Image (spheres, grey):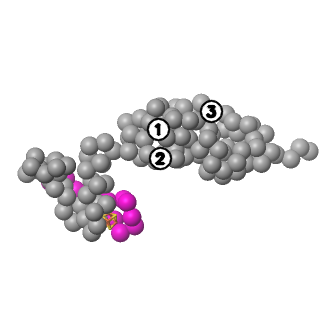
Amino acid sequence: MEKKEMVCIVCPVGCRLEVFEDDKSKSGYIVKNAACPRGEIYAVKELKNPTRVVTSTVKIKNGLLNRLPVKTDGTISKDKIFECMEIINSIEVDAPIKVGHIIVENVLGEGVNIIATRSMALAEKE
Ligand code: SF4
């Protein structure tokens, strides 16, 4: 039986998981060395459909800074991250923006939004 090794990133403990394919188990895998049930859930999801939260910045006009930090408010499929970054890189928003403001709704149909992770006031005019 082929063994896959991975580190669980759900919490800071970072359990070193060993995963074996197993047709007889419900998930299709046996997960060893997980200190809690979340490790098995993480490992199976990571093998079947890996997802990530995307964090980045977008251009902002008339703000105190030139870039506004953003992130997805949930995870998206790993194979859609490049497309998501292309969308993020094409966006320019106008200040002022409040933290939590939705910049892109339902990005790539993944059921998550791109949101602002800080507020940005208007730049003071000289
Ligand atoms: S298996 Fe549980 S305890 Fe271990 S890193 Fe994952 S979430 Fe943390």
- Quarter holding ligand 1: bottom left
In the rendered image, which residue does mark 3 sit on?
91
Position in image of residue 83 (x %, y %): 46, 32
Residue extent of the magenta highlight: 3-14
Foreground residue among 4 and 46: 46
Position in image of residue 51 (x %, y %): 38, 45
Locate residue 49 relative to residue 31 in the image: left or right.
right
As displayed, is residue 36 above or below residue 45? below
In the rendered image, which residue does mark 1 sit on?
111
Residue type (three-letter) at the residue carrying disc 1: Gly
Mark 1 residue's CB less than 8 Å from ligand 1: no
Q: How many C-alpha atoms fall within 10 Å of the one at disc 1: few (<14), some, or many (≥20)?
A: few
Position in image of residue 42 (x %, y %): 31, 54
Position in image of residue 36 (x %, y %): 28, 67
Helix, strand or loop for disc 3: loop
Quarter-of-image position of residue 91: top right
Residue type (three-letter) at the residue carrying disc 2: Gly
Which corner quadrant holds the C terminus? top right
32 drawn magenta: no
How many numbered dots are placed on residues in this image?
3
Locate residue 18 relative to residue 39 in the image: left or right.
left
In the rendered image, which residue does mark 2 sit on?
74
Q: CA gap, disc 3 to disc 1?
A: 19 Å
Quarter-of-image position of residue 30: bottom left
Mark nearer the N terminus (1 vs 2) = 2
Mark 2 residue's CB less than 8 Å from ligand 1: no
Helix, strand or loop for disc 1: loop
Nearest to the eye among marks 3 and 2: give it: 2
Foreground residue among 36 and 55: 36
Q: Residue drawn 41% across and 35% down? A: 80
Mark 3 residue's CB less than 8 Å from ligand 1: no
Q: Residue drawn 59% across and 44% down? A: 115
